[in-house]
Structure formats: structure tokens, C-alpha cells
Amino acid sequence: MCGIVGYIGFRNAVPMILDGLTRLEYRGYDSAGLAVQTSQTLSMRKATGQVSELRKLITKDPVSGQVGLGHTRWATHGPPTDINSHPHFGGERDVVIVHNGVIENYEQLKSQLETLGYRFYSQTDTEVVAHLIAYHLQEQQKSGAPWPHKRTAINAVELTLAKLKGTYGLGIVFRDLPDSLLAARVGSPLVIGLGEGENFIASDATPLAGHISKVVYLSDHELAFLTPEGVEISHRDNGRQDLSIQSLDQVSAEVDKGHHEHFMLKEIYEQPMTVENAMRGRLDEDEATAVFGGLNLDPQQLRKIDRIVLTACGTSWHAGLVGEYLLEEFARIPTEVEYASELRYRNPPMGRNTMLFAITQSGETADTLAAMRETQRKGHSSLAICNVVGSTIAREADGGIYLHAGTEVGVASTKAFTSQVTVLTLLALYLGRMRHMSHPAGQKMINSLQQMPEQIADTLKCFDQVKDIAQKYYDFNNFLYLGRLYNFPVALEGALKLKEISYIHAEGYPAAEMKHGPIALVEERTPSVFVVPRGGIYPKVISNLEEIKARKGPVIAIACKGDDRVKRLADHVIEVPDVEEYLQPLVTSIPLQLLAYQIAVLRGCEVDRPRNLAKSVTVE
Ligand code: AGP
């Protein structure tokens, strides 16, 4: 969840690291720090709060060097304080490290090190790793290993890693080993950027864009040794590895908000384009089906699928719920949606022809990755529906479909959701056409899908109206979100958006479930957001809406254009285009994203950096 950036080369590392950390800030933002190697010393600067605080500190108290490590933190062990911020020193400032992940056996290691006389200043698990490296370095020196020496440094790190339980992406610099930087990973992503006379490490490729064009993604149990001139990678069990060099996808001139006040708003407005990108080149009008380049399965294998499991977390899990409805309706394949955090430890029976899809924006979510690995271990093919090219899940899946939504920086996922829903619709079309769906039905679906970018653009016009509604309700403390069928996941997603960025308590329910408990919450200060576009069970949702009105609950309805019935009943109506029922989530989710956004802004919340959250959840 934390952001790591490291530099080794001929330039001053400090501005490179500060810029990199700013680009990575969406990964964690409760404190930041950096360390640089200068002649015979390691200098460190750390500050609680955002990277801008660290910048201010460095302006007041400058530091420079051509080898350095930076970190932006999402606290796991110990609150966000200067002391707990990374980097952390080991030994007598012999080594400095930054860490992303969680060391599960840190308490045991800490007490062993304390017995040996090591003093701890922070409450972090990371400081244990730093001291342990320093300890092994000292032990090796005692037994005659040469120092400073590359092999001795690598040995000290390898001996340390062998003792760690948990996950880590580590950047390591030794005080006395000039022009060297080490990196290692298990479970937490690290990418190495290859330049001319300079090299980089980072927790994702975002900070590397514009500096280099070639990258190597580190795999679990690999250790990299970087100098300005080159990079060597070794694997714990397989020794020296050839560099698998990939070109850096242009992740990121996009890390800029354009004319928008927040990344989240920019990303909401990108949706007509991102939905179009998700479909680009994937619609075959002649065959009335979808086409995918990366599934790596032939039609014969795909026809054999008799059950699908979709696994994901958070917003991606909500997209999975929409996917369940789509796949069952159009492909007639029994589908289940599992929280990845549960699936990884459950042991549900899975037949030979069960196919797993891991849905993830980042491709780094620890639970989703673990659920996918667990399923693969049992011999099932696992495919990814993923946004970030080169991410761990994208690389480890047997095949998959990219969203092509571009970098999503806002912690609250918006455009990834609509892209995931679009891709799942294409998947339902593809699998449906292999089985029961007729050519005309496929064509009709394609025609409707092609209209979606325009329908989304049309929906976005509700911005000002949503702003007025937000003005009325932004200081309320509880919201209910209600919808049925395809709009039940939309209700869950709307509630999640509001919770995560405005800190208002919000619950999403299938509208008819209200009567079984939640209706007890309804009163004048509990607004219900009803997602009630026209469709098969529209009259039933209207009855649910009436039940709320009868109890004096304010109602904000998301309804189809010109729906006078809803207008008469609801306190506010936000109109969306009348689209096919199975495509409604692509339009009904938009006003809910905007509502959460406007309310958060009015409450003075940090929209792109909500408290306690981070963009990609790489710890369990
Ligand atoms: C969405 O707004 C959240 N911030 C979060 O629920 C997110 O969707 C979840 O952590 C899964 O992330 P992923 O799609 O990158 O796997």
C-alpha cells in the first residue's frame, strides 16, 4: 500500500525521489521520508503528512546525494508519526531501508534483536528488518567476509530474508557500499526502471514514466542489485536470472488532474472514453460477438466451462456482482462472486471445468492475488480482468482482459468500475454467443453497447443538479442506497463511494430487503437513494419507494428520463437515459459517484486521499 521509489545514478536523487513520491502518493499518504547516501553517511529526512510536508522540510534543511530511497506510508504498525515514517536505519546507521508489506513474525525477531542489544525507536515492523540486515552484516564481517563488498551485502540481505514471514517490497542502501542499491520482494510489488547510467526502483511504474522506457518487474523471492551501470537479479532458489525487460507502457503523463479540482472528478468525466476504450477492437459485428486477444484458451476449452467464480474486493467485487447477473442471464453459466479475502482461506469445491476470474483495477490487491494463486494451485485456470498492465495479477494469471482505462489515481474507484462492467458485458456476450445466444440477440447487444459512451456523457450533465442535492444533505449522518437486480450492486457501490470519501455512514441493500430490518432506520434525517430506472420489476421498486415515503424518509431517486411517476413520489429525481436493463449500471452509477464527490467536497474532505485508505491494498 505504501509507495517506494529509489534512485541510483549521476543526478541528485532527491528531486527525483520527491517527484516520484508525489506521483505515488495515492498509495499511502500519512507520512513520507527519504534517505540518501553521501560520502560515508546516510542522511534522512522524514515528515508526517503529505509529501508536500517532506518537500518543505527539505527546502529548510537540504540534503543531496546520487543514491537514495523514498517512501510514502500507509501505516500498519504504529501511528503516522515522524519516527514511524520510513526509511529506517539498521545497526549504527549501517544500512537504511524502506518497506512495503507486513512482517508477521516481527515481534519475535524484535525481542531476539533486543537481547542482542539493538535499540528500537519506532513501533514499525520495518525497523526489525533494518536491524536484522545490520546484524547479519556484522556477523559476516566477524567471520572474515570482505567489507565493503557486493557479495557480503547480498549475503546479509539473503540471510535476513530467510528469517522473515510475511510480505515485503524492500529498498536497501548500505552506508559503506557506495553506488549500490538493493531491492527484494515477496508479495509486495516492485518494478525496476532501467536507464542510461542510472537505474530506479519503484512500487509501481508511475514514478518511472518520463525517465526511462524499459522496466523489469521483480518476482517473488527475487533480489536485485543495482548500480548506476547495471542491474543483476537473483532468485532465492534458482540463482541468477536473465532480465526480462519490458517496455514501459505510458502510464503517465496522466498523473495530472487537468482542469479538474480532483483526480476523482477527472476520472468520473473520463468514463465515456474509458468505456469506449474497454470495447475498442473487441466487438465483431459480423459474428455478433466479442473478441479477446489474451484469454489464452481456445473455444473448445471455453465451451467446457460449467461454472464461473468471480473474485475481487471492494468496488471490483461490486462489478463482479453485475458480472454474475450478466453471465447467468446471457451465457447461462452458473456464476458466483466471492470476496477474495474469504476465498483465499475457504476451500469451496470446484469442479474441473470451473473458471476463476480475478477482477482488479490495480492488479496488486493482496487478497485477490492470494485467492487467484490458491485456485491455480488446485489446477484451475485463472484469468484476470485488470487495469494495470504488468501488475502481479496480470502477470500471474493464465490469461485475461485489460480494461485500458488509463491510470486511476483517485482512491475511490470510478472509471475502473464502469470499465469492469463493460468488459464483463463483453464476456457475457462472448460466452453467450458460444452457447445459446442468437445472432440477432448478439447484434442487439453490440448496438446497445456502442451507444453507451454517449449515454454516459449525457448522464454526466446531471453535475449541477447533483450539486444542489448534495448541498441539502451533506451534513446528514446516515444514507441508505437501494436498488434491485442489476441496480443492487450499483446501490452497494454508491454506498461505498459515499462512505469512503465523505465518512458518512451508508448502507446498500436490495430494495426489497428493507422490510426485513433496515427500514427501522428510516426517519426524516435518513435519506434513501433509490436506483429505480424502468425495467421488469420497476413497479416493485416503486412500492419499496412508497414504503420509505410513508415513513417520512427523504428520497433521492435515480430514474429514467421523463419518469413522472417517480417525480411525483421522490423528493429529488436525477434522470438517466433509458438503456437496456443489463446496461443500466453504466449510467446509474454515474450520479452516485457525483453525489459522493459533491458531498465530500462540501464536507471539506480530502477527496483523492480519504483517511485510512490507500489506492492499492497490498497487505492482507
Ligand atoms: C474502491 O473505491 C476502493 N478504494 C476499493 O474498494 C478497491 O476497489 C479495492 O481495494 C479493490 O482494489 P483493486 O480493484 O485494485 O483490486
Image: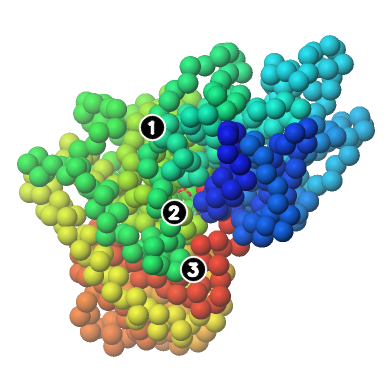
Q: Is residue 309 above or below residue 560?
A: above
Q: Between disc 1 and disc 2, whose residue precedes?
A: 1
**Residue 320, percent from left and from top:** 38, 49
Q: Between disc 1 and disc 3, whose residue precedes?
A: 1
Q: Is residue 249 above or below residue 494?
A: above
Residue position marked by numbered label 3 in the rendering: 498
Q: SS of the residue at dot 2?
A: loop
CA gap between label 3 and label 2 equals 24 Å
Crowd around label 2: few <14 · some 14–19 · many ≥20 (10 Å): some
Give the side of residue 233 with respect to residue 533, left or right: right
CA gap between label 1 and label 2 equals 19 Å
**Residue 410, percent from left and from top:** 47, 58
For discs 3 and 2, the disc positioned in front in the rendered view: 2
Q: Between disc 3 and disc 2, whose residue precedes?
A: 2
Residue position marked by numbered label 2 in the rendering: 255
**Residue 538, percent from left and from top:** 26, 71
Crowd around label 3: few <14 · some 14–19 · many ≥20 (10 Å): many
Name the amino acid type tagged 2: Val
Q: Please tell me which residue is depicted at 55% across the width and 53% down the height of the picture.
A: 22
Q: Is mark 1 within 8 Å of ligand 1?
A: no
**Residue 237, percent from left and from top:** 59, 15
Residue 368 can be seen, yes or no: no
Name the amino acid type tagged 3: Leu
